[in-house]
Image (cartoon, grey):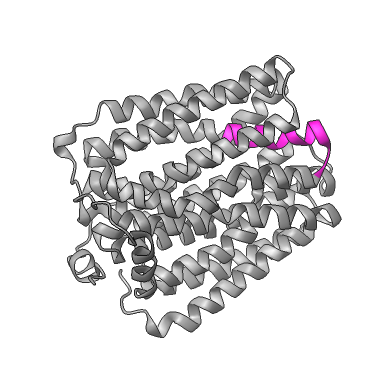
């Protein structure tokens, strides 16, 4: 069974820092994603504040976040198989349209005062079902837009844009919540999907690098799992991400609670904390473009920096101290995500890429419902302990990488 390494990573000549942006299809895609991600993070902040407003409960925030991502954990492996079989562009048009409609419904319910926690949970579950299909399709579509040579550069640029949204979205949310209300955050997100739909509609199919679709057959899901287990450059980053994703990416749970109950702040404090994380991620993304590298050594270094940053944030006495520390955490986070994503994409054979990226998405996003419930319960006792648990998880992930490093065959600079 091919592992994809020889065909994908040996011709690894240097490329310009923003080389992938010279591809018109990718440039329009990233632009649309950038606009939409600002809207998505605006809504993410709004949902956490809305749940706190309705319940004043850390556990409720954790359960709402868990409901939002539980379908990702359960459905993404099957979604990855669909991505290998179907047009990724058509899948993304379907998911973007549906997510826009979902945000519009939430906006209407909040603005009319009809939103209840039962509806929040139901909407979160539907959101998760759509995300389970959208995430692997979006990741696996990148190589089809730019070709093999620019995969790493394109993944880094795309990850950086995700974190531009993470940096800007919370600030937009804080402004909207303080001036005209939470409901408008959902409305802004609904409108932001127009940028994605326009970008996908205007793409030139003839300029894509399509991968041969996998014909439907029995046992393909298991075949994908078995394939991933045979390639250390795939399975080790996925296992590290599962650990880190479970205990550190629950910022929708931990940061609003940390801001309110530990730092005695409100929505503005939460937005500053999340915005600092996003700003650090943007800087980290630029660093990854200037100093491209894949493989376990960088993943290990990023995990260790992540662990140190999370531990320091857990001990921070004030917002003024926590903000710069979260900048460092954001830098480590994007370095880990970008390096891991690039590593598995380069190591994967094209016919397995949908299933491989689905595994990554499951470890990254799908671990959130487990972690959100755990962190929500820990935060109910002491929000600092939840952040400390994330630091321990990052350290354990680094140890896993160190132990597996001798079996990893290739490190790419």
Q: Is residue 94 left or right of residue 346?
A: right
Q: Viewer-proximal residue, 30 or 219?
A: 219
Queried whether the magenta region covers residue 161, the answer comes back as no
Q: Which residues are magenta?
A: 41-57
Residue 325 visible: no
Q: Position of residue 216 (x, y in %)?
A: 27, 52
Residue located 54% across and 68% down the image: 303
Above or below, comparing residue 34 to residue 297 in the picture: above
Residue located 65% across and 48% down the image: 66
Above or below, comparing residue 322 to residue 67 in the picture: below
* Quadrant housing residue 104: top right
Above or below, comparing residue 352 to residue 128 in the picture: below
Name the magenta segment's main secondary structure.
helix
Q: Position of residue 340 (x, y in %)?
A: 42, 62
Q: Viewer-proximal residue, 106 or 387?
A: 106
Q: Position of residue 320 (x, y in %)?
A: 74, 48
Residue located 55% across and 37% down the image: 127
């Amino acid at each position: 069974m091919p592992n994809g390494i020889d065909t994908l990573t040996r011709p690894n000549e240097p490329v310009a820092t923003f080389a992938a942006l010279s591809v018109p299809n990718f440039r329009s895609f990233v632009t649309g994603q950038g606009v939409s991600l600002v809207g998505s993070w605006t809504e993410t902040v709004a949902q956490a504040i809305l749940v706190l407003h309705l319940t004043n409960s850390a556990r409720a925030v954790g359960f709402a976040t868990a409901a939002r991502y539980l379908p990702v954990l359960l459905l993404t492996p099957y979604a990855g198989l669909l991505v290998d079989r179907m047009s990724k562009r058509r899948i993304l048009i379907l998911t973007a349209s549906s997510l826009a409609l979902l945000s519009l419904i939430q906006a209407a319910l909040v603005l009319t005062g009809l939103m209840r926690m039962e509806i929040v949970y139901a909407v979160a579950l539907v959101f998760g079902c759509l995300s389970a299909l959208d995430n692997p399709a979006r990741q696996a579509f990148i190589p089809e837009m730019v070709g093999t040579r620019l995969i790493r550069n394109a993944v880094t640029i795309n990850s950086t844009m995700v974190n531009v949204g993470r940096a800007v979205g919370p600030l937009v949310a804080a402004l909207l919540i303080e001036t005209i209300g939470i409901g408008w955050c959902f409305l802004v997100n609904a409108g932001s999907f127009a940028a994605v739909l326009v970008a996908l509609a205007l793409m030139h199919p003839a300029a894509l690098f399509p991968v041969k679709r996998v014909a439907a057959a029995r046992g393909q899901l298991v075949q994908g799992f078995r394939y991933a287990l045979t390639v250390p450059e795939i399975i080790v980053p996925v296992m590290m991400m599962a650990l880190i994703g479970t205990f550190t990416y629950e910022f929708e749970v931990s940061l609003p609670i940390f801001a309110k109950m530990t730092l005695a702040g409100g929505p503005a404090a939460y937005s500053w904390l999340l915005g600092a994380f996003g700003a650090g991620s943007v800087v980290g993304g630029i660093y990854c473009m200037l100093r491209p590298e894949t493989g376990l050594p960088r993943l290990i270094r990023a995990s260790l920096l992540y662990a140190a940053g999370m531990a320091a944030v857990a001990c921070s006495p004030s917002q003024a101290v926590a903000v710069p520390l979260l900048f460092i955490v954001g830098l480590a986070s994007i370095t880990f995500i970008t390096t891991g994503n690039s590593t598995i994409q380069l190591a994967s054979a094209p016919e397995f890429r949908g299933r491989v990226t689905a595994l990554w998405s499951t470890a990254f996003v799908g671990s959130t419902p487990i972690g959100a419930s755990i962190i929500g319960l820990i935060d109910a006792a002491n929000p600092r302990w939840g952040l400390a648990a994330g630091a321990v998880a990052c350290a354990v992930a680094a140890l896993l990488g160190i132990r597996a490093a001798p079996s990893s065959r290739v490190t790419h600079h």
